[in-house]
Amino acid sequence: MVLTETAPSRGCDLLAARFSAAGYEVSFPKPQDRERGAMIVSRLPFAGPPPCEVGYLPCRAVSVTVKTASDTVDVTGLYVPSRDATPAKTERKRRFLAACRDSIPTGADQAAARIVLGDLNILEPDHRPRYRFFKAFEYEFYDWLTQAGYHDAFRLRHPDADAYSWVGRTGDGYRYDHIFVSDPLTRTVVECSYLHEPRAARLTDHSAMTVRLELPVTNALVVSDPSDPPPAEALF
């Protein structure tokens, strides 16, 4: 599971602590003050060092390798900066996307299973409807992922569907959130969809995404319910 827009807050610290105490693997590089980032929570054990390290705003690019039954999968969770029309925020987003391009390994390697996912704050070039205020560098990052051997998992299962993970106040929809899989994983994608219930319930302003891969797993961690309160400390 990848959580985005995490913050240096008591709430995010609690999430990380509860999942960890419940037996999950957790990677949460804490953002600096007023910054945001991402968190990865896994029922599969981590293996080795992070496979990808982004040099600019690194807390927004969390990367782990997880063990499957016979191999590993690299997972990179991104929270790409949003922007307005100001030069500073536009350059910040442009610089982060450039750093990702410099750091994310190819998806065309047939010996490496990789997933890149998160709130990318970009649209596919043929997004319906078309919004004129998006710049070329934003569409180019989507194109770069496909040219680097990654495949839009939602489009693998729903090639023509209009789907939106964020909806503005005027009702206009945007597919900002994406899951990309590398070449070797394309045949394993069973389903990929958006879950709108968290957004509809106003728990968040984005819909969640889910992907199901047909991969053998024999080493899942034994976990408990992270929502259960921790046991009280015994006093002797």
Image: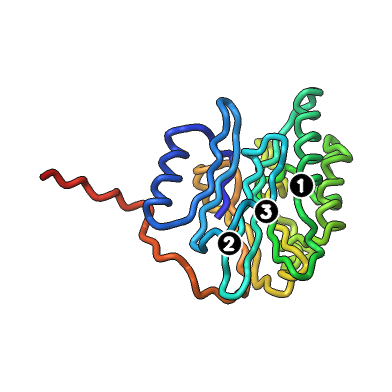
Mark 1 or mark 3, which is nearer the start of the sequence? 3
Residue located at (71% from left, 69% from top): 185
The percent position of residue 164, horizontal first and vertical second, equals 69, 51
Is residue 173 visible in the rendered structure shown here? no
Quadrant where the C terminus sits is top left
Q: Quadrant of residue 179?
A: bottom right
- In the foreground, 56 or 183: 56
Residue 6: x percent and y percent? 55, 39
**Tag 2 residue:** 66
Q: Which residue is mark 3?
A: 51
For the point 85% across and 51% down, the residue is 144
Q: Nearer the viewer, residue 14 or 163?
A: 14
- The residue lying at 63 percent from left, 51 percent from top is 50
Residue 71 numbered tag: none
Amino acid beneath label 1: Ser
Q: Label 2's element?
A: strand
- The three-letter code of the residue at mark 3 reads Pro
Provide residue 143's location: percent of width, then percent of height.
86, 52
Q: Mark 1 highlights which residue?
A: 103
Marks 3/2: CA–CA distance: 10 Å
Dot 3 or dot 2, earlier in sequence: 3
Q: Residue furthest left?
A: 236
Query: For mark 3, does the 10 Å Cα neighbourhood hold few (<14), some (14 to 19), or many (20 or more) residues?
Result: some
Q: Tell me: residue 186, above or below residue 82.
A: below
Q: CA distance from mark 1 to mark 2?
A: 19 Å
203 above or below 10? below
The type of residue carrying mark 2 is Val
Q: Are marks 3 and 2 in contact (CB under 8 Å)?
A: no
